[in-house]
Image: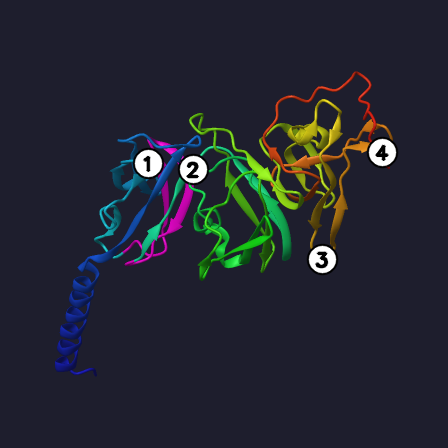
Amino acid sequence: MFPYKNIKLLIIFLTSFFTLSNIVLAIPGIPHAFYGTATINGQSAPDGTLIEARINGVQMSNTTTIDGKYGYPVGSFYVDDSQNDKTGKVIYFFADDVDMEESIFFSTGEVTRLDLFSGEFLEIPLNKKWNLISIPLKLVDNKPETVFKDIKDEIASVWKYDNGKWYLWTSDENGTLTEIEPGWGYWLLAKENTTLKVPINLNPIFTPPTRTLQPGWNLIGYYGINEQTETDTCGFDYKYGNYVYCALNSLIDTQQGFPRWSSLYTYFNCGNNNAGWKGLYACVGKKWSNNKMFAGKGYWIEMDVQDTYAPVTNCVWNSNLECTGVLMP
């Protein structure tokens, strides 16, 4: 028979154990803090925009924006863990009750920069190794560490070429490349297949972008978001683009009808070692060609003279789409 004394000791032990467990569970856990920018439809969130963090539809914390930012000073906006039961739960973020489509797992004691954005994104497919890309519009925050923050672990380097000089950015050391601008092309070395999501900025306050191209080779990108959906060499559906002779209209001698460039190339990387160069023509025979440029892709262009590259809305030629005096294949 089990001794009465032992039973009494067991009861005391179990009582003490559960009491201690409850005490430990009752100790408040360390919060998870958040801060960053808030952008709504391409524009900085107005002062006083309500930012909420929710778990399972229940508000856990809230704050308001100032100068398009929330959570400043850092540590002022956090999700509490008073019952020590938040670890691993998913936190969702809202701005004035609009789902910002950002979520993150609660992690005890973490401090996370999380830039919130609502609106349309341009998706740029990236395959392992080299990709030639561009950004079609001005960004609210164009620092490389912001543009590539969601895929920084999948990127080895980003390069820009300007007037004979190269500029570099890496996620570890930053570098000489400090801005990602429309109208420029960028070489991006990816460690893995991934997708770059770029917010399409519709802020009407920004002036249209332009850049000066030098004689010789220039690395450029496509301007704007004209809807011209088409499947590219790799089978990806690009939503925004235009014909070469329209996209580069600012680089055509409108008096003579001659392009001021002699060569235009893009680089495709479809993955599985399927990569290479593709030449694009403004004219085929004596007609303007159906070759297109696309938002998100980059291009090498060889200029005959210095000229200003700018977004265009004018694409008017004669009714027969003839390339007067231009000799092309």
Q: Nearer the viewer, residue 99 or 236?
A: 236
Whether tag 1 and tag 3 are in contact, CB under 8 A, the answer is no
Q: Are marks 1 and 2 in contact (CB under 8 Å)?
A: yes
| Rendered location of residue 313, percent (x, y) | 62, 23
C-alpha distance separating marks 3 and 2 = 35 Å
**Residue 238 position in % (x across, y down):** 65, 37
Mark 2 or mark 4: name the one nearer the start of the chain.
2
Amino acid, disc 1? Gly
Quadrant of residue 83 within the rendered picture = bottom left
Q: What distance separates the C-alpha of mark 1 from that of mark 3?
A: 42 Å
Q: Secondary structure at mark 2?
A: loop
Q: Quadrant of residue 11?
A: bottom left
User: What residue sits 64% from the left and 56% below the top?
Assistant: 130
Q: Position of residue 186 (x, y in %)?
A: 58, 48
Q: 162 above or below 317?
A: below
* Residue 280 belongs to magenta span: no
User: Which residue has dot 2 on it?
Assistant: 140
User: For the residues carrying marks 4 and 3, which lies nearer the camera in this image?
Assistant: 4
Kindly state the secondary structure of the residue where label 4 is placed.
loop
Q: CA distance from mark 1 to mark 2?
A: 10 Å
Tag 3, which secondary structure?
loop
Image: magenta residue range: 85-109
Which residue, given by chain and number where applicable, does mark 3 sit on? Answer: 272
Q: Residues within 10 Å of mark 1 (few under 14, many from 20)?
A: some
Dot label at residue 327: 4
Task: Judge left or right: residue 312 versus residue 198.
Answer: right
Between marks 3 and 2 in the image, the one whose residue lies nearer the viewer: 2
- Residue 160 screen position, x and y as percent: 56, 50
Name the kind of residue labelled 2 in the image. Val
